[in-house]
Amino acid sequence: MIAEQMKGFVKNSSAIRAMFEEGKKLAAVYGAENVYDFSLGNPNVPAPEKVRKEAVRMLAEDDPVVLHGYMNNSGYEEVREKISNFLNKTYGTNFRKENILMTVGAAGGLNVILKTLLNPGDEVIVFAPYFGEYRSYAANYGGVLVEVPPNTTDFQPDLVSFEKLISPKTKAVIVNTPNNPTGVIYSEKTIRAMADIMRSKQQEYGTDICLISDEPYRELAYDGAEVPYLTKYYENTVVGYSFSKSLSLPGERIGYLVIPDEMKDSGDVIAAANVANRILGFVNAPSLFQKVVAECLEEKTDLEYYNRNRKTLYHGLTEVGYECVRPEGAFYLFVKSPVEDEKVFCEAAKKHRILIVPGNSFGCPGYVRIAYCVSYETIVNALPGFREVIRELKD
């Protein structure tokens, strides 16, 4: 009965979600406090109090017909105005409300822009390791995913390989910084060099290449690290943003796209993205939370909570022999497996009720992702188990 394409999607369904479901089963047997689930990037920090207050206030005071009704497919004008002003003030940009399209999270936004841009057979370049759902998002519109192999020294993009992989069929390049799963922030030097390569290739092939910046972790940067705002470095850039991590609202599915005027044929792209938002079935982003986030743009998540987790887990693992690049942002560690096959490592960890995600899910076998957006107690209590796992695998 189901479509042939869906058979493949079902067979290769997200390892992250599968591990999350397994964690719930283990918790039912052993108790949640005895299962150390590092599989899912589900924030353990509550949303800022202002989020709750604004939602309650709006539900009590606003006209319910307006609050829960349809609006322009791009979203409420006043919301987009506030977001554009906030971005201009924060990053020195020059956006208008017309450059903002409210979306159903970053995932919805990525699907909207890929629907807008891709013809069947167009290529979408990603840098391994990368968020595995990009494969499905590109395939949704007949796109062909092209993987740049990982630079496992520091996990900055391998620009030599990148330049070689750009072809006349290249339509988009997706970057994610701070990166899921490594926590690495792509440096300004890297971004400038990447932009120069794309400009050169556009001129060589007479094509247009869109840089799509997937930014759900932008605010999660530690030790004063700077995250470059990519529209300032390359004209054909679209930014996909989500409030899932910055305001701990993953289930509310609220984000936006930025489509700058500097982009080639920006008016056509904006118009097409609006139509894509509708015909994909999103119609518009959730109405209540459009208004809520517009009042909470200056709010911050508890970064120190994640930072303590980051330091504790990083030091706890590296002190007993694990290898890992020190993450600068997001809330993940990408740890080298003590044995060649990381799935063996994951199974060994599971025996100690530790749930981690194999790196092949991110196009980078030999590593595992550990999400530290969990309680501090989970990290502390899991460290003895991690110590036992590496001892068992090394013996």
Image: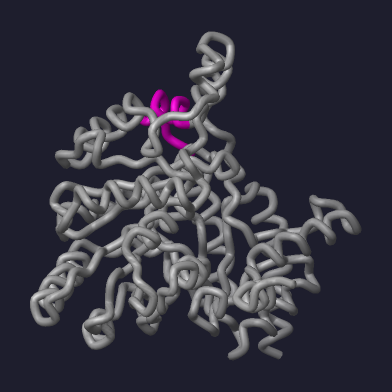
- Within the image, what quadrant is residue 209 found in? bottom left
The residue nearer to you, when weighing 159 against 280, is: 280
Q: Which residues are magenta?
A: 290-302
* Residue at x 72%, y 73% (from the top left corner): 349
Q: Is residue 38 magenta?
A: no
- Residue 296 falls within the magenta-colored stretch: yes
Quadrant assignment, res 74: top left
Q: Residue 174 in the image: state x and y as whole percent.
A: 34, 66
* SS assignment for the magenta stretch, majority: loop
Q: Please, is residue 286 above or below residue 149 in the view?
A: above
What percent of the width, then of the height, locates residue 2? Answer: 70, 71
Circle count:
0
Q: Nearer the viewer, residue 130 or 9?
A: 9
- Residue 291 seen in render: yes
Q: Is residue 303 visible?
A: no
Judged left or right of residue 40, residue 221 is left
Quarter holding the C terminus is bottom right
**In which quadrant of the rendered image does the N terminus lie?**
bottom right
Q: Residue furthest top?
A: 61
Which residue is pictured at 49% across the width and 53% down the height?
Answer: 280
Left or right: residue 32 compared with residue 110:
right
Q: Which residue is found at the position 36% from the left and 51% from the top?
A: 240
Q: Give me the residue at 32% from left, 63% from top.
A: 117
Q: Position of residue 79 (x, y in %)?
A: 36, 28
